[in-house]
Amino acid sequence: MATTPRILLVGTADTKADELLYLQRCIAAQGGAASIMDVGILGTPSFAPAIPNHAVAAAAHTTLEALAALGDENAAMTKMAEGAVALALDLYARGEAHGLLALGGTMGTDLALDVTAALPLGMPKFIVSTVAYSHLIPPERLAPDLMMILWAGGLYGLNGICEAILSQAAGAVVGACRSVELACESRPRVAISSLGKSCLSYMVRLAPALVARGYEPVVFHCTGMGGRAMEALVAQRRFVAVFDFCLAEVANMMHGSVVNAGPHRLSAAGLAGVPQLVAPGASDMVDIQTWAERPAQFAGRAYHAHNRLIASVNATTDEKRRLATLVCERLGEARGPTALLLPQRGIHAWDKPGQPMHDPEGHAAFLDAFRAAVRAPVELHEIDAHINDDAFVDRALAIFDRWVGAGQVPAGVRAD
């Protein structure tokens, strides 16, 4: 970046004045310049923020007095978040904010999540939070490129530990502004959902085949956060098509697993009219934390520990049937071309004969449930292959090529 990185610094200036001013000094020491946006409502800050709180309220078409009169801090801060979003987007559009750094406890984090989710991919965004990495934060509220750091020892006032963390955050956002390479739009992008290739390996062949056709494949790791990022970017119409071949997160959400991508997984492409090819890869299992006590309802089920973080248990036949119905309901809401691919010989590496999740009767019932629930205009393609076989990828590409030929998917841009 040729210019000085200009950082929008967001926080409640009445309660976090020392911290905000410290961050401003740290950013200046790194060669950046920070403008403070005050999102507090009731108190009076000890300094004059560049963007005062009454301007934030005005951007939300209200006043500080009206917000205080609500008598509800949640409703008031939600409204302030609207104003902060509007101002941040305007500053970014005018080139007056290259990156954003927000700090807070649960209240400030709540507001900051709205602001960072609204800002475009590629604008560095960093939150210093007392609840970073907490299960209090639902995955659907996280921007795909959001960075966070735990604000240890930062609840009230500056101290050595707090300063060590804040100074890292200041350096991180300035450095990100200097080093970020904005995404090139030279080739149409295609999203692919998957897991690691020890479980789902179709992308090993699928991705280069798409490159050869002039597309840029982007593969998302569907262990909760990856699927949420994919859904968010699909909703922004960043992709011309989606190969959604790993529905593990849909199954996990249905079973209450924390390894989920929120309640709207498998919805964005359909609602946006983005062409989608869908297969139930790895969705006949439930993912759980290896390190936690196994939930009682999963006792006695087939179990596979992938590593010390994530493990899986087999779903019952009835659970598989319910999932098939849910998937077909979501596909039935699609506004664009949609194809459901059913691999008859298995849907992940661990369901093959001799593997811990091998369940041929359950898989047959799973396929039957899909056949019973799918409705036109969703295309149904049954494939006499395993999801990791070349024959599965060949069929998927044949469908994709047909959609390209029919003008339903933009043609790729091949290298000269």
Image: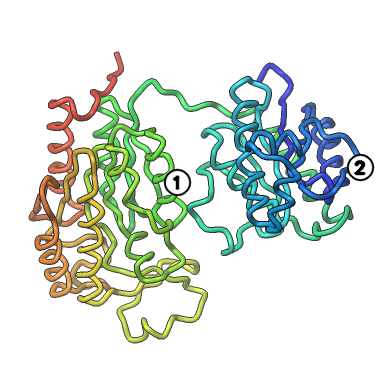
| Quarter in which the N terminus is drawn | top right
Which residue, given by chain and number where applicable, does mark 1 sit on?
Answer: 229
Q: Is residue 195 above or below residue 191?
A: below
Q: Is residue 395 left or right of residue 180?
A: left
Q: Is residue 181 left or right of residue 394?
A: right
Q: Position of residue 365 (x, y in %)?
A: 13, 71
- Residue 366 visible (yes or no): yes
Residue occupying image coordinates x 21% and y 63%: 324
Residue occupying image coordinates x 38% and y 64%: 253
When asked about the image quadrant of residue 151, the answer is: bottom right
Which residue, given by chain and number where applicable, does mark 2 sit on?
Answer: 46
Q: Position of residue 15 (x, y in %)?
A: 83, 51
Q: Is residue 94 left or right of residue 159?
A: left
Q: Position of residue 184 (x, y in %)?
A: 45, 23
Q: Is residue 49 left or right of residue 384?
A: right
Look at label 2 and name its amino acid.
Ser
Q: Is residue 152 above or below residue 114?
A: below
Residue occupying image coordinates x 73% and y 48%: 103
Q: Position of residue 220 (x, y in %)?
A: 39, 46
| Quarter in which the C terminus is drawn | top left
